[in-house]
Amino acid sequence: MRKLINDPDEYVDEMLQGMVAAYPERTRRLEDTEILVRADAPIEGKVGVVSGGGSGHEPTHAGYLGPGMLDGAAAGEVFTSPTADQLSELLTACEGGAGVLAVVKNYEGDVMNFETAAEMAGMEREDLEVAQVVVDDDVAVEDSLYTSGRRGVCGTVFVHKVAGAAARRGDDLEEVQRVAQNVVENVGTMGMALTSCVTPAKGEPTFDLDEDEIELGIGIHGEPGTERIEAMSADRVAEHLTEAVLEDVDPAEGAEVATIVNGMGGTPLSELFMVNRRVQELLADRGFDTWNGRVGEYMTSLDMRGCSVTVLELDEETKELLAAPAETPALTVTD
Amino acid sequence: MVDSETEREALLAAISNVADRLTEEREYLTDLDSAIGDADHGANMDRGFEAALDRAESTDGDAAEMIKTVGTALVSAVGGASGPLYGGSIMSASAELEEGITPETTVAFAEAYLEKVRDRGDAPVGAKTMVDALVPAVHTYKKSIEADDLPPLEALRKAVDAAERGVEFTVPLRAKKGRASYLGWRSVGHQDPGATSTLLILEELLQTTEQYVDSEADGDSDARDATAPAEPAIDPDDAETENGDAVDGEGE
């Protein structure tokens, strides 16, 4: 499979160089790291909000750097957690005297490296306060005490937005963590794929699908889904995904919701809009009120064709924080 | 107590032996990981201990400092979950060696390491992880030293045997933690790569300890053979103890 790359080994480094070149006033790269921070980080007196994870999910995470969202983002190798020493630098670089909230997607590597990073940063600077939220919005994966648990996927974008807005308005670390955790508890996502993705190192699909098959319940790393079924129309896919998410999130009767119909990296926007059409019909039929419905690429899986549907049940506070201004390369909200 | 130069030499030899062994077994670990994981454990551990050796060689500090360096190097070079599990745990357990390397401090190190791994990975015994090799090894080592009053070299031998049984025990298990857990029942019948690398490390620590004990014995065989355990034996025996434990502690 052909890819538009130079050298698989330079994939992340060259991508980051290009990102900084695209947003030179807004972002800067910490020397000798794969970390991007807001150009003006750390912000004195503000809780720092940071995230990080494997690369291949762009615009996640560095695309959300900016006022009202993230202060810093660490990029690991493709689909691989950043290392703890880098994450430790990330925490330190984004600390402006009010502590740092780390938004972590629920993968063992990410969780453990962030925990170790907090310890390492604490050894260097005893006064550094770090809190974290772990996002596990993927409703496809069995959640059990005895397994690695649900994965963190597109719902993470809502967590970035809400935590970033709370930090910007001056909430303290505990409060920023609370509003972020509140999102984690009220959001669900389910994804599907028409094709696998192709990683730069491997150069071939991580799973094979026949022409007439689709994969449901996929993650964002090309791992196979929970179910393989016969290909179906955009409407049926939308119904499948939305039903699964609603069953899990279980919004109150007549609740307001925010939604994301997210492309996995290789899906035309036209198709995403088509899926969104049916998602919104279905939500309205159920008596839910979509306050804000986003369509686009927020959490991708390289070149995978497919989509995910995210539903967040809103309360007044969350709504207010989602509506607050944000100026980032990948997401802008204006008053 | 062994002088710090000998201690340092023994530690470096141990790290170097572990690094060599992981290079040798790189393909083996990768094959194990391909079956139930993402096929990078061999390369990651190999790269990690190369970096650890490199950094340890350029450290001037005492044993605790050297071991901490090993941990930090693994954290930054191994990646994935193994970085924090192996490296982060060594890093935080290294504080137990601040009083030098003795049977007591190495038992404390081994326990602190195990506790950190369990805490971080949240895996019980039987979840098909490195914990399945580590728990029997650490418990056996502690019991051999504290309850059975065995010499450290003997305790280490027993610990390696226990770890080996632990590794075999992972084969029929269904993975409940780690990447293999996503496979559910399909993970049954495969040996766990993390438990395996833990055993390889322990085997090299034992190997190194034996080398050092032998060389001590060669150089001072009279003292070793002829004396009653009490007084004159202190020198060589202590030497074994130091080296053996240093090695044991650090590698785990």
Image: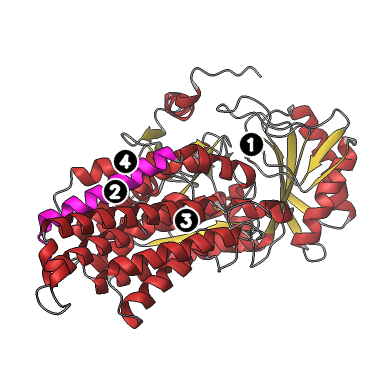
* Chain under callout 2: B
Q: Position of residue B208 (x, y in %)?
A: 28, 53
The answer to whether dots 3 and 1 both sit on one chain is yes
Q: Chain of mark 3?
A: A
Which residue matches tag 1?
A300
Local SS, label 3? helix
Under mark 3, the amino acid is: Met
What x and y, as percent, mark residue A252? Answer: 78, 66
Residue B15 is tagged as 2
Q: Give me the C-alpha separation between circle 4 and circle 3.
A: 20 Å
Q: Is residue B207 left or right of residue A334?
A: left
Q: Please, is residue B233 above or below residue A38 in the view?
A: below
Q: Is A29 included in the stretch rendered in magenta?
A: no
Residue A21, image x, y percentages: 42, 23
- Helix, strand or loop at disc 2? helix
Considering the numbered disc 1 on the image, is that residue within a helix, a strand or a loop? loop
Q: CA distance from mark 3 to mark 1?
A: 23 Å
- In the image, which residues are magenta? B1-24
State the mark number for residue A112.
3
Q: Chain of mark 4?
A: B
Task: State the CA–CA distance, disc 2 to disc 1.
Answer: 41 Å
Labels 1, 4: one chain = no
Crowding at dot 4, Cα within 10 Å, few <14 / some 14-19 / many 20+, comes out as many
Q: Amino acid at mark 4?
A: Ala
